[in-house]
Amino acid sequence: MTTKINNVIKYAESLIGIKYSGKNRGYNKGGFWVSDDKIPSKKIIKEQGCNCIGFIHLLRRKADLPISVISKKSIIGSDDWIKYLKKNKRLKKFNYKKSYPKGTLLLRKFNPINFGHVAVIYKEDKRGVLFSSIIHSEGMGIRIDGKNYFRGIKIDETVGFSYFNQYNSKTKQGRYDYICLPNDWLNKI
């Protein structure tokens, strides 16, 4: 399984810099990339862009795993993944005090304010998940201390940056609700 995770992460790295696109262009097209077909060329992915869930779909397809098992809908979002993983007993509550291995999928439920989100642990830090880095497609386009942060496929140096960027002080909940270990989302269920 380590080889599969490393191959998926290597492929993810090759997509860094691709622009964010929330638009659904249809079957096996940019934004969501819903398909069980062969992965399109990087040129096509670059032209059409990719959102966070589309990025995960491309990674799963790189592992030769179908997307159609998650849902038959033309748009498959984080809630569909959560439902699928929960049904198959592959989902765990996110715990910011724990450390998760490279390749772990982080998920947030959809909400009307800042939508859902998914990301992948890029490098584990044994001090805890908030110190680990992630690779994902970010659509929020934020500005901190006068610096613009890229919208699209990128690596964030810490999960903490992403987690607290969307922290809700009322619920005491940050950006992520669930995790799915690499062996549980990069294998057939």
Image (cartoon, rainbow, N blue to C red):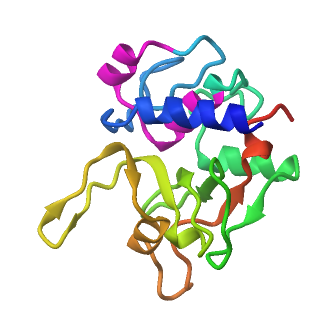
Q: Residue at x 25, y 61 (%)?
A: 142
Please say if 26 is above or below 88: above
Tell me where residue 110 sits by quadrant: bottom right
* Residue 36 locus on image (x, y percent): 66, 17
Q: Residue at x 66, y 52 (%)?
A: 104
Q: Residue at x 77, y 29 (%)?
A: 69
As rendered, which of 16 and 162 lies closer to the eye? 16
* Residue 109 locus on image (x, y percent): 60, 59
Q: Residue furthest bottom?
A: 170
User: Which region shows up in magenta?
Assistant: 40-60
Quadrant of the drawing holding the C terminus: top right
Please say if 16 is above or below 124: above
Residue 129, can we see it?
yes
Q: Residue furthest left?
A: 146
How many numbered markers are drawn? 0
As rendered, which of 131 and 84 lies closer to the eye? 131
Left or right of 148? Residue 11 is right
Q: Residue at x 33, y 32 (%)?
A: 18
* Residue 52 locus on image (x, y percent): 47, 43
Residue 188 in magenta?
no
Quadrant of the drawing holding the N terminus: top right
Residue 56 in magenta?
yes
As rendered, which of 22 and 49 lies closer to the eye? 49
Left or right of 23? Residue 91 is right
Residue 54, can we see it?
no
The dominant secondary structure in magenta is helix
